[in-house]
Image: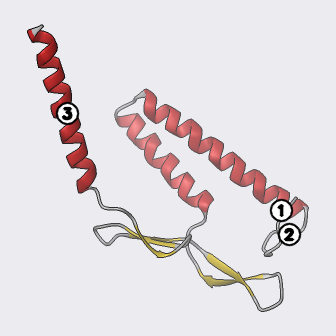
Amino acid sequence: MKELRRRRKDVAKRLRKRKKTQKEKKAMKVIDKGHFYENDTGERIRFAKKQPAGSESKLNLVYDGFTNEEVVEILLDRLLYFNWELPCRENDWAMVKLQEALMWLELRTKRREAQGVETTAKAHA
């Protein structure tokens, strides 16, 4: 019975600590929704932004930045490095899912190119 109470106290203590840690984390600040982000230390990441020019469906570059594919590749490289240093199953699974995400993004681009709508504001089928 004493052992059970001790375990419950340990679990409650860990949960309080976890909640405190989660509260201390600051949310990512959105500067330009979908394109520009800043964390609580002032580090920024910017994605390329394209908009249609007037009535045309052709997209014009508003400002340069990363693509989704580039960010996924960066994350894959980072996890590969970490997994080389300290291998773990969670890193392996995260890399598998990032590779899958990259595959879907590349498939989307190929389909858009094949349908002649890449670099336009038109949806692909």
- Left or right: residue 63 compared with residue 26: right
Whether the residues at callouts 2 and 1 have beta carbons within 8 Å, the answer is: yes
Quick one: which residue is furthest to the bottom in this view?
54
Query: Quarter of the image containing the C terminus?
Result: bottom right
Residue at image point 12% right, 10% down: 3
Horizontal arrangement in the rendering, residue 46 relative to residue 99 (left or right) = left
Figure quadrant of residue 26: bottom left
The location of residue 73, given as percent across then percent down, is 56, 52
In this picture, residue 14 sits left or right of residue 77: left
Q: Which residue is mark 2?
A: 117
Of pointers 3 and 2, the one earlier in the residue sequence: 3
Name the residue at 50% across, 54% down.
Answer: 74
How many numbered marks are there? 3
Q: Which residue is mark 3?
A: 14
Residue at image location 77% in from the left, 59% down from the top: 109
Dot 3: within a 10 Å radius of its alpha carbon, few (fewer than 14), some, or many (20 or more) residues? Answer: few
Q: Which mark is residue 112?
A: 1
Distance Cα–Cα, label 3 vs label 2: 52 Å
**Badge 3 element:** helix
Q: Which mark is residue 25?
A: none
x 52%, y 46%: residue: 76
Residue 21 lies, in percent from the top left, at 23, 48
Image x and y of residue 40, in percent? 30, 67
Residue type indicated by callout 1: Arg
Q: Earlier in the sequence, mark 2 or mark 1?
A: 1
Q: Is residue 72 above or below residue 93?
A: below
How far, Cα to Cα, is label 1 from label 3? 49 Å
Q: Amino acid at mark 2?
A: Val
Task: Identify the amino acid type marked 3.
Answer: Arg
Say which of marks 3 and 2 sits in front: 3
Name the image quarter holding the N terminus. top left
Q: Which is nearer the eye, 69 or 34? A: 34
